[in-house]
Image (cartoon, coloured by chain):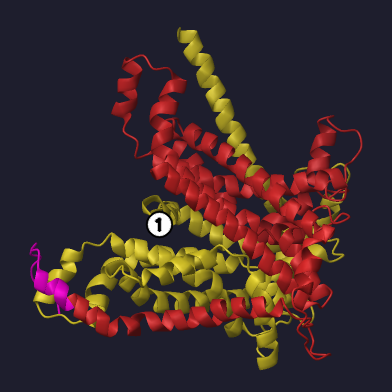
Amino acid sequence: MKKKIKTSRILFYIAIAVLVVYILAPFLWLIIMSISSSTDLSTKPLSWIPKKVDFSSYQELLHMGKNTHGESFLFGLRNSVVTSFTTVLISIIFTFPAAWVFSRYPGKKNVILKIAIVTFMLPPVAYALPIYKTLSTLGWLDNSFALAFVYCTLVMPFCAWLTKENIDAIPFELEESAIIDGAGLFTRLFRIVFPLMMPAIGTVALLALLMSWDEYFYAMLFTNSNDAITLPVVIANLASGRQANYGLIATGGVIAAAPPVIIGLLLQKSLVKGLTAGGVKG
Amino acid sequence: MEVKSIIFINCKQCLKKMEEDISNKYSILITPMVFIMLTVIGWPLIRTILMSFTNEGLMDLEPVKIVGIKNYIRAITNNDYLSALKVSGIFAIAVVTSEMILGTLVGLLVNQPFKGQKIVRALLIVPWAIPTVVNAMMWKLIYNPEYGALNSFLYQMNIITDYVSWLSTPSKTLGAIIFADVWKNFSLVAMIVLASLQSLSKDQIEAAEIDGANALQRFKNITLPHILPSLQVALVLRIIEAVKVFDIIYIMTKGGPANKTRSGTIFIYQEAFSNSRLGSGATYAVLLVFFILIIILLYMKLLNRKEE
């Protein structure tokens, strides 16, 4: 009996070990590639451990120089930050009051929310063609703020839905007692509900930020120069060109993945809770 | 103004006041959001539908003519489009099934107590957090026929004798992309399952154990019903993403080799932007939306029937 338990325990730990290798190996290999010299990366078959640690790819990508990889990478980094923060700011400001109405006054207006959720499920190509035409007519192609506005297509329905689910969890009695004290609508909204919602809105904002940081399709269509091109597009261009410097490509990937991975590791619990909060109840 | 006291009263007057407040002011609160959504979602969607009945081009070189349902007839008889839809379908079914199974198994595995549990659980978020573009590019490097890690590894383990071109052998490419997508997204399912398992009470399982239920019975009668709602959430999230797949395929293969991995969305993109035919591109897009709406409706119907 005891032996049986022991073998099953060993099998269990083997399974865990396989899982850990499966999760980590690809990303660790990307990190190793980013600090390997190009000679180490072009031996056949590969030598897995680099002979010397080589940070030249990082130097190249993080160095500003005219018409270098560094230039487009750093501009991409800046544009990604500007675009995603603008998107999240617009989305939160406009969806919070609306989500409150959806939560507290679930009447016919919730049709709007339902339509929004359905649009969230449709592919971006369904909107992209006319948006391209409009942006090009207005001369707004290659513009970070226009791109942020377009990102609202993806992010706003998501924020509205998740914020509404979170407001549902705040007891209405709190607002009732405020009404007795004579509070008006805006006092209730911004003095009572909003402070209680701060952690939830933080999570929603973070998820929305990751979504915008990840976006590739619209960015590829609507941007093409250092003025607005985002990091995913820069990296995809690096990877698709006749670029033979694999270390450089890997470095771009590691730098772009670092912020979301670090945020994820630090805030895993609230992110997962935020993601599932909506669906589990609704 | 601060809340002085939280009094629990069923206050009809309050509710009435609230109703009045809202009916006066709700429009102010919803309008800005609705306005933005109409500009970035509503209007483009309508324009896409209108466009699909015209021969509109990418540049305004020729005057736009209305061509009626000609685009639609061409679309549903276009074998290239149908095989692109098939690629989307195969991709979606393959990744969603694998991710749900693998994710559930991993969730169950990691839920058992063991040393280092906290670290392993934390690591689960790494694949999910890596941006799709980085994931695609990472696997493209791993699959590289000359200097890729996969070939090197398989060669050194004596599993293969010749290097394989994973992304340019038609029979292997879609599988390779599916593997890359599963690696990133199984972790979402696993985290959702794990979160749900943690709210399962141990007493219930122990009681069943005393009653003599074996592991499989315990899973079927207690664990599975408990995590089912969460699994449904994960399923919906994954299906929505998988049927509109674009990024990962486009970065890894651009739809090749020989269009074997060209998904519906890539097909539409090429028609509109490479062939400069917005009109017929819009037609393909409208049809794709139509198919996705059918999937959503079917799913909702299935859910309703279960609840009844």
Per the rendered image, the range of residues in magenta is B1-17
- The quarter of the picture where residue A23 lies is top right
Q: Nearer the viewer, residue B100 or B181?
A: B100
Residue B23 position by quadrant: bottom left
The residue wearing badge 1 is: A278
Q: Main secondary structure of the magenta part?
A: loop
Judging by colour alone, the chain drawn in yellow in this rendered image is A
**Left-right relation of A152 to B196:** right
Residue at image location 25% in from the left, 79% down from the top: B22
Sort mark 1 into few (<14), some (14-19) or many (20+) by Cα contacts within 10 Å.
some
Q: Is residue A181 above or below residue A51?
A: below
- Does residue A148 sit above or below B163 in this rendering? below
Judge left or right: residue A87 versus residue B77. Answer: left
Front residue of A19/B177: it is: B177
Q: Quadrant for residue B67, please give it.
A: bottom right
Residue at 11% over, 80% down: A182
For the point 85% across and 43% down, the residue is B171
**Residue nearer the viewer, B43 or A84:** B43
Decide if residue B285 is on the left or right side of residue B236.
Answer: right
Query: Was residue A234 drawn as part of the magenta stretch in this picture?
Result: no
Q: From what the image shows, is residue B236 above or below residue A224?
A: above
Chain for colour red: B
Residue B149 seen in the figure: yes
Residue B200, image x and y in percent?
35, 36
- Split into 4 quadrants, where in the image is the C terminus of chain B? top left
